[in-house]
């Protein structure tokens, strides 16, 4: 095993860090959320220009090769800087859906995604899913050549800004994916912001008529693409969480070294030192499970992959909840103010912990696998 | 970054596993499965089987007569022993005094002692703690006063694990009472047969005899039995304690405890079904197993960052000690939960008179509570959890001392 970054990976990390520190400084980020609705297309275009939308994608489609561990470097930096644009959902998950769709147009579509000219939102999550990766109640029915779909998708990240939607729906043949343009008549969007300032929407379809060309890949054969895309996005989300919780830990450490009470730096108190030690252990355990998840996220054996992804999200989520809450606690009153950064880490981590299934859900998956194996 | 075991590493794991399967004496395996105590002969003969294969000293480089394994190989080897379960080589010998002699010993000490340590020709125990020096080890007061080519040693040492079986004790003594705490300490090797040395058993809450007190009453120790420089013993002690931390995650041991808990849960009745069907029980298994998987990678990361045979331990190895023990304790709680009332009979009360006999289904219970009891010690010895947290907070996180 080798845990060291390559020289190229270190350079990538450094340039990401510089960009994020500049573009997502506290005040700039506040404006992005309050004035730009939590998504700036200019940022997305900048990612494309920097080549960040080609990371981990095949060279044949204009990508830079590599794999998800390269993307994880980007996501850690995005997590560290509280970037609100949803790279894991709009980029990792969407690109994998296209990549694994088996559709003849996939290479061309991925090229446009890498160029930043098409921004996708993945409309898969439904109110009853709560983390279940293949839970789809949206119905698709064939109608001479095309399809009609009906149902509701919830918390579709980046939906208010997206050009196109990748929508999952179930027919008698099984799960299918549809490619739907934003301006398709008959589709309704209810837009809102999440507690971390990121943007989302609920989508509803009532007998929405789609042409044959909207079908991505073969009808009823999308299970595997959806599952693989969610595995990759879940581990990407873990990377973002590790970046965020690491930064929250060091911000808290710096605060303990400077904040004085009773005439001394509060970081000299053993009760607080031990809390910091526990947070550090939680962080390292989370980082280990991120690495383990990266080793399995694109494994072809679905049972093994799901088990590993769930174990990773379970650990990372639990560590994140602990670190975020204790980071606020150790800051005392200032940790509760909207004008200070730590509360924003707390909120961002809350949203990421819930994304792709909470840690409570994923512990349940691991427990179920134990039962199946017995 | 490469995050999976290589084909060679997987093949090595298979090689270790088949060696254990073919060479571990059956009665020893039966006792290990049941968490029963082993006799001295059983421990010695197993270590000699490993030594004949060149595997008794997993952490030693080839220059000391060790296998010269990588950190990953060392981990795999111990993991296989713990999971089988088979006894690990006596840690006082191979993880503690061996590396000390190899690193700080004179050429004469290396040539004479290392082969005997490896083969368990001499069984070693540790003479560090004292009644007044536990976590504050440097407060030790056992004195060694030099008379020509001898030290005369007086004092009391505590918690000598298997001290009643030991031939030799490595110990910290105060050679300069005027110096500041850590500065006046030396590292001595003491023959347990020395006149004036006596051993007294301490029976722990598991009802077993593993630890002892050692009394030193004008014990004469040749100066040649000092390791490293006079008054520089603290450097040796820090090195040794750092090694102790790194090896101590013992993930395979937790894996075996969980395996046994699951086996029991699948047998015992819990209302109208087996305990294995209980969602709460399975969920707790899952929680511990997730943390263990994480710790497995954390251990690899710490070992990879430390480099091979580093003299200075990485302070992050405290994570392995804290979390490894926490999970072993959690796994023993799961085992206790699985056994339920069957764990409550005192050891020996319910067991067959001959411990060599395979126990019947209802009799395994009485060796479970002792495991649970004695694991409480694991968060106290080798640097208590609280001491490890101080190390992390100060040496890793840079909080004020």
Image (spheres, coloured by chain):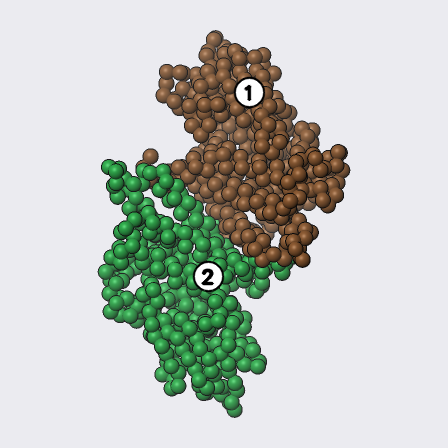
Chain colours: A green, B brown
> Residue placed farthest to the top in the image?
B148
Examine the rendering and report whether any part of residue B46 can be seen. no
Q: Position of residue B15 (x, y in %)?
A: 65, 45
- Answer above or below: position of B28 versus B191: below
Residue at horizontal 69 percent and vertical 42 percent from the top:
B364
Lateral position of residue A212 relative to residue A323, left or right: right
Looking at this view, is A257 or A62 the one in front? A257
Label 2, on which residue? A358
Which picture quadrant has residue B77?
top right
The subunit letter for the residue under badge 1 reads B
In what quadrant of the picture does the C terminus of chain B appear? Answer: top left
Q: Give the quadrant of residue B387.
A: top left
**Image quarter of residue A203:** bottom left
Cα separation between marks 1 and 2 = 54 Å
Q: Position of residue B275 (x, y in %)?
A: 64, 53
Secondary structure of the residue carrying tag 1 is: strand
Closer-to-camera residue (B206/A204): B206
Please state the chain letter of the residue tagged with numbered disc 2 in the rendered image: A
Question: Are circles 1 and 2 on residues that touch, CB within 8 Å?
Answer: no
In the displayed structure, B330 sits above or below B214; it is below
Residue A68 x/y as whole percent: 45, 61
Q: Secondary structure at mark 2?
A: loop
Depth order, front residue of A120/A194: A194
- Can residue B336 be seen in the rendering of this structure? yes
Q: Residue at x 75, y 34 (%)?
A: B354
Q: Within 10 Å of the Cα at label 1, are there few (<14), some (14-19), or many (20+) other Cα atoms? A: many
Instruction: Name which residue lies at 37% across and 18% down.
Output: B179
Residue at the extreme front: B271
Q: Looking at this view, is A233 or B27 the one in front?
A: B27
Percent coordinates x, y for residue B389 in the rendering:
42, 39
- State the residue position of label 1: B214
């Amino acid at each position: 095993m080798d845990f060291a970054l390559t020289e190229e990976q270190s350079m990538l990390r450094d340039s990401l860090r510089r960009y994020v520190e500049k573009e997502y400084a506290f005040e700039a980020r506040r404006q992005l959320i309050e004035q730009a609705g939590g998504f700036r297309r200019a940022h997305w275009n900048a990612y494309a220009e920097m080549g960040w939308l080609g990371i981990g994608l095949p060279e044949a489609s204009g990508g830079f090769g590599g794999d998800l561990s390269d993307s994880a470097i980007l996501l850690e930096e995005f997590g560290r800087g509280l970037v609100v644009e949803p790279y894991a959902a709009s980029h990792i998950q969407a690109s994998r859906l296209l990549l694994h769709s088996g559709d003849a147009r996939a290479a061309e579509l991925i090229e446009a995604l890498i160029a930043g000219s098409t921004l996708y939102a993945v409309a898969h999550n439904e109110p009853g899913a709560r983390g279940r990766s293949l839970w789809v109640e949206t119905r698709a029915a064939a109608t001479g050549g095309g399809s009609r779909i009906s149902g509701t998708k919830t918390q579709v990240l980046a939906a208010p800004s997206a050009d196109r939607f990748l929508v999952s729906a179930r027919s008698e043949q099984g799960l299918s994916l549809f490619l739907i343009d934003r301006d398709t008549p008959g589709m309704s969007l209810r837009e809102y912001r999440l507690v971390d300032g990121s943007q989302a929407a609920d989508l509803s379809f009532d007998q929405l008529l789609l042409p044959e060309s909207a079908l991505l890949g073969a009808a009823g054969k999308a299970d595997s693409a959806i599952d693989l895309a969610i595995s990759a996005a879940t581990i990407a989300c873990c990377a973002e969480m590790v970046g965020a919780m690491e930064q929250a830990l060091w911000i808290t450490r710096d605060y303990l070294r400077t904040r004085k009470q009773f005439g001394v730096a509060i970081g000299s108190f053993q009760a607080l030192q031990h809390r910091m030690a526990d947070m550090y252990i939680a962080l390292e355990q989370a980082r280990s499970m991120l690495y383990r998840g990266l080793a399995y996220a694109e494994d072809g054996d679905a049972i093994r992959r799901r088990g590993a992804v769930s174990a990773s999200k379970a650990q990372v989520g639990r560590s994140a909840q602990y670190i975020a809450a204790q980071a606020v606690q150790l800051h005392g009153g200032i940790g509760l103010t909207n004008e200070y950064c730590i509360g924003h880490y707390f909120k961002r981590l809350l949203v990421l912990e819930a994304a792709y299934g909470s840690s409570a859900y994923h512990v349940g998956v691991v427990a179920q696998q134990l039962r199946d194996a017995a | 970054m490469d995050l999976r075991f290589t084909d060679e590493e997987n093949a090595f794991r298979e090689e270790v596993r088949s060696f254990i399967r073919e060479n571990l004496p059956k009665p020893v395996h039966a006792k290990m499965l049941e968490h029963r105590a082993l006799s001295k002969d059983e421990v010695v003969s197993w270590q000699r089987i490993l030594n004949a294969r060149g595997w008794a000293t997993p952490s030693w480089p080839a220059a000391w007569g060790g296998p010269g394994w990588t950190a990953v190989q060392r981990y795999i080897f111990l993991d296989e022993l713990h999971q089988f379960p088979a006894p690990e080589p006596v840690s006082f010998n191979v993880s503690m005094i061996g590396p000390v002699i190899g690193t700080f010993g004179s050429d004469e000490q290396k040539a004479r002692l290392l082969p005997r340590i490896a083969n368990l020709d001499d069984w070693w125990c540790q003479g560090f703690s004292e009644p007044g020096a536990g976590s504050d080890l440097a407060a030790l007061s056992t004195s060694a006063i030099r008379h020509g080519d001898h030290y005369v040693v007086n004092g009391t040492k505590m918690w000598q694990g298997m001290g009643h079986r030991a031939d030799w004790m490595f110990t910290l003594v105060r050679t300069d009472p005027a110096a500041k705490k850590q500065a006046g300490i030396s590292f001595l090797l003491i023959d347990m047969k020395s006149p004036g040395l006596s051993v007294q058993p301490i029976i722990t809450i598991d009802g077993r005899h593993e630890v002892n007190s050692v009394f030193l009453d004008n014990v004469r120790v040749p100066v040649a039995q000092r390791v490293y420089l006079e008054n520089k013993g603290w450097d040796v002690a820090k090195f040794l304690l750092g090694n102790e931390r790194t090896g101590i995650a013992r993930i395979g041991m937790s894996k075996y405890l969980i395996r046994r808990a699951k086996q029991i849960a699948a047998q015992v009745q819990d209302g109208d079904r087996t305990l294995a069907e209980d969602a709460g029980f399975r969920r707790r298994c899952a929680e511990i197993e997730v943390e263990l998987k994480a710790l497995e990678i954390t251990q690899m990361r710490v070992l990879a960052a430390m480099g091979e045979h580093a003299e200075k331990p990485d302070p992050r190895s405290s994570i392995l000690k804290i979390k490894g023990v926490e999970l072993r304790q959690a796994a023993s709680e799961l085992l206790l939960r699985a056994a339920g009332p069957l764990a409550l009979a005192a050891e020996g009360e319910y067991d067959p008179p001959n411990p060599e006999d395979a126990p019947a289904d209802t009799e395994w219970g009485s060796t479970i509570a002792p495991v649970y009891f004695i694991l409480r010690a694991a968060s106290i010895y080798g640097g208590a959890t609280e001491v490890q947290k101080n190390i992390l907070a100060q040496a890793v996180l840079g909080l004020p001392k």
